[in-house]
Image (cartoon, rainbow, N blue to C red):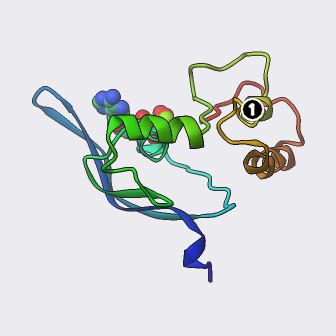
Amino acid sequence: MPDPAQIVFTACGLTKTYRMGEVEAPALRGVALDIYQGELVVLLGPSGSGKSTLLNILGGLDSPSSGSAQWRDHDLARADEKALTRYCREHVGFVFQFCNLISSLTVREHVALLCDEPTGALGYETGKPVLEGIAHQSGAGHDGGGNCA
Ligand SMILES: Nc1ncnc2c1ncn2[C@@H]1O[C@H](COP(=O)(O)OP(=O)(O)OP(=O)(O)O)[C@@H](O)[C@H]1O
Ligand SMILES: [Mg+2]
């Protein structure tokens, strides 16, 4: 049984609805999750199921329509833009799906860039297990340009 004290992300009843004029597009409908310290999480789902929407909220790039989302003692659902920008800058490393990718680098090398101190958001110690996990999964080879996010 995981130790609740080790939870770093927690979300409950998380919703996100995009509005385009009169049209509403629900992207998340009541997501609940706990993520533990050191846990490697893979988010799987068909295109349009809300993976990027959820990652954007957990990464401080967007805010939910309702529900709670917390990273340690940071309330991500109610943080203003300035607080989210600071959180994102100091604690989050994103490898985007389509943009800001360097074609000659592998997935592992993109993540390694985030672990370069002092500019990388993850820091070497935080990023190390992620890099080891990727090396283990891929045999440290090139990824052939597959999706990163
Ligand atoms: N900025 C936006 N404005 C309006 N609708 C959006 C916006 N971003 C996402 N959506 C819609 O929200 C839903 C979830 O999209 P999202 O991009 O989170 O899915 P995804 O699981 O990441 O898909 P993919 O695997 O293609 O990356 C989709 O129906 C999408 O059309
Ligand atoms: Mg996506």
In front of the other: 13 or 25: 13
Report the side of 140 relative to 102 (left or right): right
Image quadrant assignment for residue 120: top right
For label 1, the crowd category at 10 Å Cα-Cα, with few meaning under 14, some 14 to 19 and many 20 or more, is many
Q: Which one is in front, 5 or 131? A: 5
Residue visible at 80% across and 44% down? 131
Residue at 84% of width from left, 49% of height from top? Answer: 132
Please state, as top left, top right, bottom left or bottom right, where the N terminus lies in the image: bottom right
| Residue 33, visible in the rendered structure | yes
Residue at 38% over, 35% down:
82
Q: Residue furthest top?
A: 103
Q: Is residue 65 left or right of residue 38?
A: left
Q: Is residue 27 left or right of residue 144?
A: left
Q: Is residue 34 above or below residue 74?
A: below
Q: Quadrant of the C terminus?
A: top right
Residue 28 placement (x, y as % from top left): 33, 49
One can see residue 48 in this view: no
Which residue is at 41% across, 44% downward? 57
- At which x and y percent is residue 96? 58, 29
| Mark 1 secondary-structure assignment | helix
Give the image location of residue 137, x and y in percent: 81, 48
Where residue 89 sits, quadrant-wise, is top right
* Residue 55: x %, y % from top left: 48, 43
Q: Is residue 28 left or right of residue 111?
A: left
